[in-house]
Image (spheres, coloured by chain):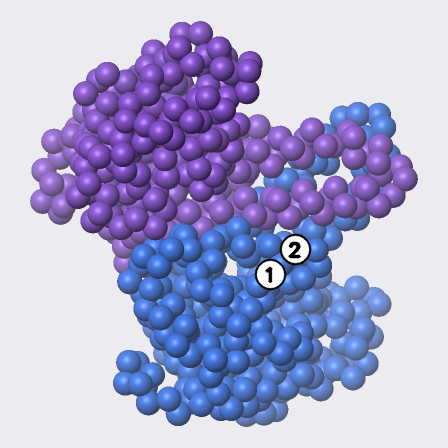
Chain colours: A blue, B purple
Amino acid sequence: MRLAIDVMGSDQGPRAIVEGSARAVVERPELELVLFGPCQHLVAELARLPRPLAAATSRLELRDAPQSVEQDSTLAWALRNGGDTSMTAMLRCVASGEAAAGVSAGNTGALVALARREVGMLEGLSRPAISTSVPAGRGQRCYLLDLGANVDSPPVRLVDFALMGAAMAQCVDGIARPAVGLLNVGHEAMKGSACVREADRMLGERAEAFGIDYRGYVEGGEIYRGELDVVVCDGFVGNITLKASEGLTRMLVERVQATFESRLCGRLASLLVRPLLRQLKQELNPVRYNGASLLGLKRSIVKSHGSTQADGFYHAIERALREASLNLPARVDALLRERGLAAAPPRMAVR
Amino acid sequence: MRLAIDVMGSDQGPRAIVEGSARAVVERPELELVLFGPCQHLVAELARLPRPLAAATSRLELRDAPQSVEQDSTLAWALRNGGDTSMTAMLRCVASGEAAAGVSAGNTGALVALARREVGMLEGLSRPAISTSVPAGRGQRCYLLDLGANVDSPPVRLVDFALMGAAMAQCVDGIARPAVGLLNVGHEAMKGSACVREADRMLGERAEAFGIDYRGYVEGGEIYRGELDVVVCDGFVGNITLKASEGLTRMLVERVQATFESRLCGRLASLLVRPLLRQLKQELNPVRYNGASLLGLKRSIVKSHGSTQADGFYHAIERALREASLNLPARVDALLRERGLAAAPPRMAVR
């Protein structure tokens, strides 16, 4: 199994990416990685790897890409510079089939636009969505999308998100008829914007054909209740909701820890609860720890958090590997075709 | 001190409202409440009060209002039925100056529209915002607005929200130059919708004149970091973010409790941490426990959560009482005038 890695564009610089990549090939004997970046960076970082990881370099192939898409690069610049950038070169390696999936910790907006151009969308879908699952209820999880691939989304795109999320829940978690909710400010029919109301009407009409258990409007609190497999919203709302949840978890965990540590018998309790708190923090910080999937593309592309450390990037590679092993894009495509999405004429007209 | 109470329209029915009101007058000897609702409901609920609260009925004045605005009532219906509804009758009592502030647990959209018509906006402001504070950092708090009074908001309204939130932080918490952030999906200049970018430009230009420490774009996680006094967003995003935070807190608290209770020495820890967890749950569920303020009106109106129990409604009355004691609307008005908001000609043209 070969994956393609964009080494540039993360907030932490190329070292964290190269280290996370080296760790991945050490842990997974079947894995080969193709690393894209400016030659001198790649060689320097490889030389700096700690000894236990250095053994893995034979399964890290280096490919020179002199430019890199930075967090503040404009989309126009990224589109213009094509294969000279490590991001586009990585995507082309995936698009050609040479690598089964790709990972980048770079600029999200550029990654979405470049992936759409280089890798291409599944038939019938217009734009990728970013998704990850958050913990919900007592051990369930819920796919939340879009997390920021699109800043605003017309109704037909919200319908696409519902389908992509449902396909993810089916393929990855084996849920036959996923429960899908549309995020809104209340349950009543007249709540929300015209866009959300139109998406609700469309989803209501097509739920049966799509094989989803459409639950209508859901409020923010329901994401974590464990009764929904997929929650759909536009990328602005999803991004802010997820990041607020991460920030809140961090604050709550710190407060609980501080309470324990201020008291004698609390220190004992602290030992007990520390592993749980650490796990909760990781689960509620899914993008930072595991990356997020770009859904709707012809191949698996994973977005790692921009400020990720080597450990987080390693987990993002794991995610890409799992998606490639599941053959996720092909399975999503099959599900979409089965439901007639690609051929539905009114959708094409609207778009 | 007299406050006006809308007894109808909550999900729990009039009993919780009447009981919360009775408790408020028992605890506050200086307080009188005017209760609006259908006469037979008011009399029946008063007769049902438990004995310790029954003594307070002499300071609960009943006024007949035969209709009530339900959660699924349309705005048009609510506007048409005027003083016949308990909500409008309550607002008129406040508008006339007979009551110093008002509280309702009814339909949010109707309350916002009716309050705007009956009570009126402060000069220079076009629409109310709903706001409450959430806990942040290590004991700070952050005002978040709008929480759902407006489903989408043009740039000039986001600027209004920033001013209203800053005025709240100054008046209630005595913060001379509040730190204000604008919620977005990233810090870079090109992030977000055209609307958010325009609001950012306007806030950047006017921060000095407005006496705020404008921090530019902030991401969802920064709400809870303790470095901001006010975070501004449109009502759709704010509502979902707050409710997601409430739901997440509930889930986290349940998981921490379950971990404790499954182990022997954990039960000890549970006793230790339970008060903290209860407090966190209340703080992160601010609307349910304390209501939220409608800002920008000529008088204080508090929105209690629709599914509130007697206890929650009691806290909403406390909030209204505090705002009335602080003379909050007059102080917000004075701050806005001082900053020339009401008279700024380009703003009027935009609106």
Q: Dot 2, crowdedness within 10 Å: few (<14), some or many (≥20)?
A: many
Residue B112 tag number: none
Residues marked 1 and 2 touching at CB (< 8 Å):
yes
Chain under callout 1: A
Q: Is residue A198 above or below residue A326?
A: above
Q: State the residue position of label 1.
A: A227
Q: Is residue B6 above or below residue A139?
A: above
Q: Quarter of the image for the N terminus of chain A: give it.
A: bottom right
> Helix, strand or loop at disc 1?
loop
Front-lying residue, A238 or B166: A238
Position of A287 with respect to A47 (left or right) is: left
Please tell me whether mark 2 sits on a helix, a strand or a loop.
loop
Quadrant housing residue B103: top left
Residue at 38 percent of width and 68 percent of height: A200
Residue A126 rendering spot, x and y as whole percentages: 39, 80
Disc 1 versus disc 2: distance between alpha carbons?
8 Å
The residue identified by callout 2 is: A137
Name the N-terminal-most of marks 1 and 2: 2
- Of all residues, the one furthest to the right in this rendering is B264
Pick the front one: B266 or A271: B266
Q: Chain of mark 2?
A: A
Q: Residue at x 22, y 17 (%)?
A: B97
A4 relative position to A188: left or right: right
Residue B340 point in image, percent of width and height: 17, 28
The amino acid on which the numbered mark 2 sits, given as a three-letter code, is Gly
Between B314 and B244, the residue placed more toward the observer is B314
The structure residue drawn at horizontal position 19% and vertical position 37%, both measured from the top left corner, is B82
Q: Residue at x 33, y 17 (%)?
A: B61
Q: Within 10 angstroms of label 1, few (less than 14), some, or many (20 or more) residues?
A: some
In the picture shown, does residue A263 fall above or below B79?
A: above
Residue type for callout 1: Glu
Please provide percent x and percent y for residue B250: 62, 44
